[in-house]
Amino acid sequence: MNLRKLVVTASLGAIALSALATVPAAAQQAKEQYFPVLVYRTGAYAPNGAPWANGYVDYLKLINAQGGINGVKLSFEECETGYATDRGVECYERLKGKNGGATTFQPLSTGITFALTEKAPKDKIPLITAGYGRSESSNGAVFTWNFPLLGTYWVGADVAIQYVAKQEGGVDKLKGKKIALVYHDSPYGKEPIPVLEELGKKHGFEVQLLPVAHPGVEQKATWLQIRQSRPDYVLLWGWGVMNLTALREAQATGYPRTKMLGIWWAGAEPDVRDVGEGAKGYSALTLQHGAEHNSKIVKDVLATLHAKGEGTGPKEEVGEVLYMRGLISSMLAVEGVRKAQERYGKGKVMTGEQVRWGLEHLDLDQKTLDAMGFAGVMRPVQTSCLDHMGSSWVRIQTWNGKKWEFLSPDWYQADDKTLRPMVMLASGKYAEEKKLSPRTPEECNK
Amino acid sequence: MLYRENGQFKTSYAADQQIFPITQDRWAIIGILVFAFVAVPLLVDEYMFRAILIPFVILSLAALGVNLLVGFCGQITLGAGAFMAVGAYAAYNFHIRIEGMPLLASLLLGGLTSAAVGIVFGIPSLRVRGLYLAVATLAAQFFTDWVFLRVPWFTDYASSGSVSVSNLQVMGWQINNPLNKYLFCLAILTVFALMAKNMTRSAIGRQWMAIRDMDVAAEVIGIRPLFAKLSAFAVSSFFVGTAGALWGFVHLASWEPAAFSVDRSFQLLFMVIIGGLGSIMGSFFGAAFIVILPIALNQLLPAIGDLVGVEISTAGISHAELIIFGGLIIFFLIKEPHGIARLWSTGKEKLRLWPFPH
């Protein structure tokens, strides 16, 4: 390589660097409520990440089509994380200050949530983790910026055991039973363990822990263990391709699918579609909603966006489980902004701090939800300064070989008596480690 | 004309043995240090610090460690991620279990623990070589993954297996904002890089290089392979472990074993290969290439798309990023198999003759 080439390379490099430096500055824009969207449309978990992202973005588009939040238009920008923690943190840093500041972040990854939990308080940006994240973060006194709205994994674990007890005909029948937890070997999969062990002690059943390494395509050994130990039930705490593999292995091992129960992240169409009939009878918890093709909100999205070719992603997937999860996550953020506007001025752009107030005072009753098109999809959500979860209702859906359906109309609610002390204990430990003083009721009302 | 050492006479052994014997080099290094410590903090914003510079500085340190082992001693390792993990978790345990433990001591003890573990996993290098050794060190990776996932003591019985630290300070200096974090990491990197530079010029470095070039011949001339190989493993693991501790404490603040997965090991090895085996400078080039380029591509592609009026989807950008990145790796490996550092030294050679090349 001669000198001329070297100079050309060097100057090209310099141009690239300077272009990089100017990109963030170019993005200053008009007064719009800015929603950064962390997504993963590529990588091992893309089949599950993409529909969630489509739903999330579609709802923002729908609000814009309806005139924004009291006239404030929404702007949004996607950033690809690939489910990797370091890329997620990079995306967060890139987007948090853009366009007047981020409204909220929803990383859709427990690993990224853990990392951002340390950063969000300094930047004063609320972190919504609807149905995932740290379970103890439902205590808003300690985790002031985390909002695990609608449910945590501890809620999931508790309801899963309630369901099993119901199948067996009562809590007292759990004694001597063996329940296996097949889980993704990451913070996500480990979250339910303390609750399961606690309940195991209380009701006298045995918990068998079977970790599966990321990404979860190799489960032969796990299912061999299940074949040997024959647990009465298998709880599946997987994500992405791991769920599919688990169901295939269950089929190969001959473990009855009716005895398998997945968490709400293991109960969507991509998890079972390829197994089809082989997954028949497999049940999963739902974060209130299932596949909601007939709901009004889905019809609205189809009519307003997809009919005009403005929708995100394939039209057929609108209304599927993960699409709905994304849409509802987006709705909760938007409602947080709307609530904040009631206090801080309608038609204004809200800051992260104001949005937090809004999220802490969410009060979506059934009438409001029905009016927004969520009739039959969700139950009311009411948060407070100390309760950042808002609701712990869960339904159970079952795969019939072609689609998810609710076999019984039952709603389950997590047992607060068991969970509350655990949440207080874990969040207290966190506060102690971080030398945080929990918020008092007086500080809440400010 | 500018870069020529003619006329720089050394009149004492000290002058002859100094770390940068050429005056221009000395000034260049001082210039780079001043730039990194003074100018950079004045120029860049928080995003640059947090998302680019801090990861770059920490991974440079790790790449430097890997380079000592792979580039200077010729022992291929795929366990760098494991030693980062050992450093991070050991530092974490020292930090929380011993009341009033200073941060710097925790980090260095983390590095030392990693060095000890490195020696243990370096023992197979006395028997196996080359690719077989790479496979043997891969065992370290899976072993540490397993330990930190399975043994709750190491994570202080955290229910989710994720640990976190906060309130970092060194003698009253709060390491809480991006600038201080950057300066802290940079200071450590500077000390370690000078240490590495000196080590490779001294007896121990020469022993490593002799082993790398031909271990039988080295043994014949009186170099003990046991000492040379294990010391390379120890020093390398110390560097990598300290980098791991910094990665956990300063960059992530909250981490799980997945932060130090086998992907990280590969990433570090690629940094060293692309940057230049057996070159201190190369470690920095490699780290820059692997850390900065994907992020730069990720941001440049939509900007370029805007210029020509095309909107590229998020997935499209991500795929294009991987394609271009992979293409560039192949391009560099074909054009310059000895790494980007070689490009640098070729440039220096040309500069010596400029403007009258013969």
Image (cartoon, coloured by chain):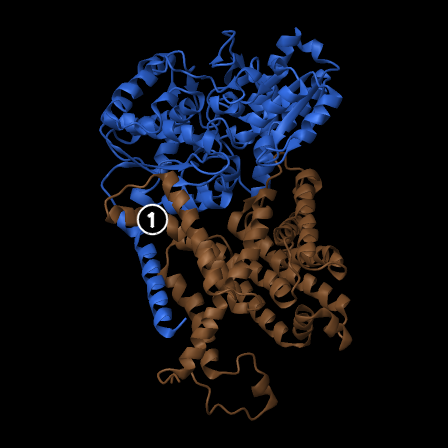
Chain colours: A blue, B brown
Please state if A263 lies on the left or on the right of A375 as rendered.
Answer: right
Q: Residue at x 66, y 62 (%)?
A: B75
When the figure is inspected, residue A49 is found, relative to residue B20, above or below; the finding is: above
10 Å crowding of disc 1: few (<14), some (14-19), many (20+): some
Relative depth, front residue between A141 and B109: B109
**Which residue is drawn at the image coordinates 42% and 55% (left, top)?**
B293
Identity, as a three-letter code, of the amino acid under mark 1: Leu
Q: Quadrant of the N terminus of chain A?
A: bottom left
Q: Chain of mark 1?
A: B
Q: Is residue A313 left or right of residue A275?
A: left
Query: Foreground: A132 or A4?
Result: A4
Give the quadrant of residue A416. top right
Indicate whether B254 appears above or below B217. above
In the depicted structure, whether residue A232 falls above or below residue B104: above
Q: Nearer the viewer, residue A66 or A309?
A: A309
Q: Classify the position of the C terminus of chain A by image quarter.
A: top left
* Residue position for label 1: B301
Q: Position of residue A206 (x, y in %)?
A: 73, 21
* Label 1: which secondary element: helix
Total numbered circles = 1
Residue B50 position, x and y percent, is 44, 52
Question: In the rendering, at what x and y percent does residue A368 appear?
Answer: 33, 15
In this rendered view, identify the residue nearer to me: B140 or A175: B140
Tell me what residue is drawn at x 34 percent, y 18 percent.
A298
* Residue B135 visible at all: yes
